[in-house]
Amino acid sequence: MKRTTLSLIAGATALAAVTGFAALTAPEGTAAPEATKATTRLPVERVGLACPVPSSSEVAETVYTSYTPAGTDTGKTPGADKGKGNDKAEKPTALLKPATGATASDGTGKKPPAPKAPATVTTPGKPVTAEANGASVPALTGSATGALAPGWTVQQTTVVPAGGSRGLLGLTCGAPDTDFWFPAASTAKARHDYVHLTNPDDTAAVADITLYGPEGVLKSQFTEGIPVPAHSTVPVLLSTLTHEAAQRDVTVHVTTRSGRVGAAVGVADDKLGSDWLSASADPSGSVVLPGIPADATSVRLVVFAPGQDDADLKVKLSTANGAIVPAGAGTLHVKSGMTTSIDLPDLTRGSAASLFLGPENAKRPVPVVAALQVVRGKGEKSEIAFIPAAGPISARATVADNRAKASTLSLTAPDADAQVKITASAGSGAGTPVSKTVTVRAGTTTALTDLAPQGLKGSYALTVEPVSGGKVHAARTLAVPQDGVPMFTVQTLTDDRGTVEVPSARQDLGVLD
């Protein structure tokens, strides 16, 4: 998914104001001294997130966990965070609030209530939680500024114990953007998939939705020019967008003509429960899908090639002992513009794993997007979750709302050995942060379950930072079984982009002859 981060542009602008960027004007006929190209990394000063309506169930119980990791001050310019005309630094903020244009899901038109607590972070390094129950909980938008902005993350976790939406639904609230890909959606009769479009900005956005099935673009209606008013959310049921026969596997492409939106697909399956489907990483010739649970009973891979060329892919399964070729699924042909899927039965065989997809011809990689539909349990005791393709962690990534004896962190290094630093934060109630360094061997997946901080009360956050070696991809599984149903959800970790590279100018200010 492309990350259009306007705050980074604002940060660069602010830096220019602080450091006094200027253009030298040389006397006529004389060339100006050439600037020496250099860059520096500064913490971002503002980020925004959007959380969709968590559930339409009256028995839904939702927890928001908001967290900013400690210690992002790389390249910080002294005085850069001071207010204009003011010697005192502006107070940093990190909070959520209801989308003002949201209305109750029961059709009353009344504004739904906000969560019982605002989930406002006041100090880096300590998670803050808020609860909100029922069907009338609104979409939330929020922003973080100053020292609370770098790495700010919000986890939305919902338990629906009964009914058609039964399940554990987990979502890392996303940054607003202009382009999203969602493989593994569906218009099948047993599925009720909604694309949630949330606009956190002060101006209206206009979005388009395109659906791709196994035979290509699905004939659809009401998918172009969808208005998303300022500070509002719009849920769109996929099955109402097309008259074509129900499709088991559909790829959804969301783009905006104007403005930005947060986007996520809410999935409810009549037999398998419910969860959120997050956007796949940007189209790429090599794809990593990390964090398949060891006890998965069913895994379905869905791939889409958005370009003009077909993709021929090699499929490898990364386990604790190395990469192997799944039985009967070593290669996959993906036609351009068509959604391709394959069932992978008995894939993990009791070992946590990840999937690697790469081009058969390394000289001709074809970009694809991908996601996994994963099921744990059997029959009426089944539960569904999704794992979208995840990009590598370049600097740091965080996932919030981890719980004692319920969280598993999966790390995989597709190409080379890698070392990462893992930090478990203080708990939302109490606890002492702990850090450890882990080595992930090339081609393997490492699953860690003993990461909770000392003296934990409440939930905690996990932060992953590469130390050395190759690229690392990560995912967190949260398992909360209820009444014999192995409820779970998987969130891939995305680089938090807590710092931004900005240009600096150094010029020879000597006297020109």
Image (cartoon, rainbow, N blue to C red):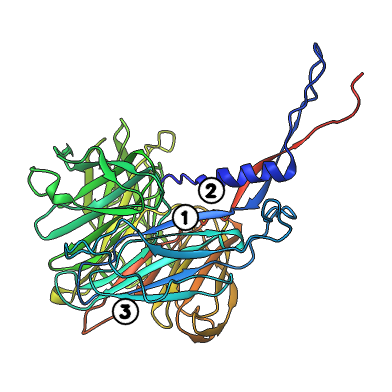
Name the spot of residue 273 as percent of width and height, x first: 19, 69
The three-letter amino acid code for the residue at tag 3 is: Val
Label 2–label 3 contact, CB within 8 A: no
Q: Nearer the viewer, mark 2 or mark 3?
A: 2
Instruction: Give me the disc on residue 7.
Output: 2
Q: CA distance from mark 1 to mark 2?
A: 8 Å
From this viewpoint, which residue is outermost toward the bottom?
Answer: 455
Whole-percent x, y for residue 94 in the image: 51, 64
Q: Residue at x 16, y 59 (%)?
A: 192
Q: Secondary structure at mark 2?
A: helix
Of pointers 1 and 2, the one earlier in the residue sequence? 2
Name the quadrant containing residue 174. Answer: bottom left
Q: Position of residue 90 (x, y in %)?
A: 64, 60
| Quadrant assignment, res 488 | bottom left
Q: Is residue 229 visible?
A: yes
Instruction: Residue 64: give its label.
Output: none
Q: Depth check: 1 or 17 in front? A: 17
Q: Residues within 10 Å of mark 1 (few under 14, many from 20)?
A: many
Read off the residue under disc 1: 48
- Name the amino acid type tagged 2: Ser
Mark-to-mark CA distance, 1 and 3: 29 Å
Mark 3 sits on what residue? 480
Residue 415 position in % (x across, y down): 50, 52
Instruction: Say above or below: 5 vs 418.
Output: above
Mark 3, other Cα within 10 Å: few <14 / some 14–19 / many ≥20: some
Q: Nearer the viewer, residue 232 or 293?
A: 232
